[in-house]
Amino acid sequence: MQEPRDVRLPIRIGNASGFYGDRFAAMREMLEGGDLNVLTGDYLAELTMLILGRDRLRDPSLGYARTFLRQLEDCLGLALDKDVAIVANAGGLHPAGLAGAIGDLAERLGLHPRVGYVTGDDLLARAAEFGLGERGYGQPVAANAYLGAWGIAECLKSGADVVVTGRVTDASLVVGPAAAWFGWQQNDFDALAGAMAAGHVIECGAQATGGNYAFFTEIADLRHPGFPLAEVHHDGSSVITKHPGTGGAVTVGTVTAQLLYEVAGPRYAGPDATLRLDSVQLGRDGPDRVSITGVRGEPPPRTLKVSLNYLGGYRNQVEFVLTGLDVETKAALVRTQLADVVPDDAEWTLARTDHSDAATEEAASATLRCVVRGSDQKAIGRAFSGAAVELALASYPGFHMSAPPGDAEQYGIFAAAYLDRAEIWQVAVLPGGDSVDVLDRSITMDLMPVRPAEVAPWQGSGPVRRVPLGTVAGARSGDKGGDANVGLWARDAVAWPWLAATLTEDKLRELLPEAAELKVTRHVLANLLAVNFVIEGILGAGVAAAARFDPQAKALGEWLRARYLDVPEALL
């Protein structure tokens, strides 16, 4: 991609990966399925950075997503033939190493791609300078700032066919190509925010085309959903769609769900701009086409978020199956028998999945899970799990366990820091090896609370029916470190005033008892007919610590939708 193209034409940016481990064939499917200018891949998440950090500890030449390299082995020639630039954050902790590996791969294949990469996000060598190791966990194994789009744009403007980065924001994979295509400047905040919205929608792959969608039963064919693409226009407006003939669907609902994924309030801050989520307007633009218009942007904050991953202690668990009668008494017996070997801070969870008078043994069974953590690997390893196994012939009737107990495994801890953006340098290494310091000329602005939009009060009356909340509302949830968000949207404008009036912070705590003692903040997004809740601390030390049954809060929204409350029959 060279200097600005014809601004009358949109840039078509596809996505082929939403996480490290996503559908391997998606890159080829996207390249063969229709026209694209750029194909992106998002491989990084908080847990992924820990995995890559462990890889780097074992071998300093690693630290990048090796799956991406194997996908390129299959598809690089095809991308070059079709003149599709590939942009991915698969560089992880070692974008230079991945760029070098791509060069070696291309030489073996007899290809000649121009490869650029973006660096500057890795702050591990500067951890002491920024005080990042003084958090009670020791030295981090990964410390990475969330960079923005301008390094990607520099590489593309210099003609790169492949650009790999370290930790950039997911949306930057779309913002960078659009900025290069249209020649945007760093103060084109509305356009940048529009591209951010498009990038946020397609960053998680098939979640924009019906994957993990609350009303999935309404999608005709979800066996093999296609991956999404965004047609981004010169003003930052976009259309979200997918290649013709692919499975899944792109609807206002699927796009709304993804816009609510892992966000907080109306101001969605990124390193390039702050997206005003309360300005986003969605519209149907045809079959499997949803327009995103009206987006307003503001200057980004003066700080950049830094992802910190530490190695914690060790973790082990055992799970007992309790069948039939006296489930709680059986659980109490196990706890008593293991009292001498289980630490006081062990987490015991009795999941009452059993049914009375069940027709199958499994349906008659509950599970009792014990999770232990500590710094002594031996004490919570075989010493703990072995004691559980020794109960096999000396405990409750029907004793058995769900899986063979094993050794303790080390877990990770996630934390976030915020550093002045002036302290962090983004460098674009262009094809050929020249380096460009990406100057940060952005105006910045402190994030301020947004006055909630006024919502017409619910005027309905008449009979109500006790039904699941999901009868009238969709939801999507996800993790942000130790916090979780749950975004809910009304199915239509008629139900929206009732949803906004009913789902208060106190009502959420009532419906989700696990949040009863936690700080809950509600944000109103009337333009999306949505309310978004941020529940602080519900995930403990984050997904890598695996402190919760659903450590990434992926199903938290579905639990909420399954809770019963009184809904006006007029809405049903």
Image (tube, rainbow, N blue to C red):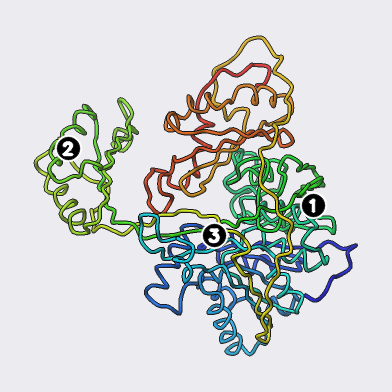
Residue 399 left/right relative to 527: left
Counting the numbered discs, the total is 3
- Residue 68 place in picture, x, y as percent: 55, 71
Q: Does dot 1 land on a helix, a strand or a loop? A: helix
The residue most toward the left is 394
- Against 517, residue 100 (above or below) is below
In space, the residues marked 3 and 2 are separated at their CA atoms by: 39 Å
Q: Which tag, 3 or 2, sits closer to the chain's start? A: 3
- Against 175, residue 101 (above or below) is below
The residue lying toward the viewer, choosing from 332 and 248, is 332
| Mark 1 surroundings within 10 Å by alpha-carbon count, few (fewer than 14), some (14 through 19), many (20 or more) | many
The residue lying toward the viewer, choosing from 563 and 361, is 563
Residue 415 left/right relative to 298: left
| In this rendering, the label closer to the viewer, 1 or 2 | 1
Q: What numbered label is drawn on residue 19? A: 3
Residue pictured at 70% horizontal, 54% vertical: 444
Q: What numbered label is drawn on residue 334? A: 2
| Mark 3 surroundings within 10 Å by alpha-carbon count, few (fewer than 14), some (14 through 19), many (20 or more) | some
In space, the residues marked 1 and 2 are separated at their CA atoms by: 60 Å
Residue pictured at 50% horizontal, 62% vertical: 21
**Residue kind at label 2, given as amino acid type:** Val
**Residue kind at label 1, given as amino acid type:** Asp
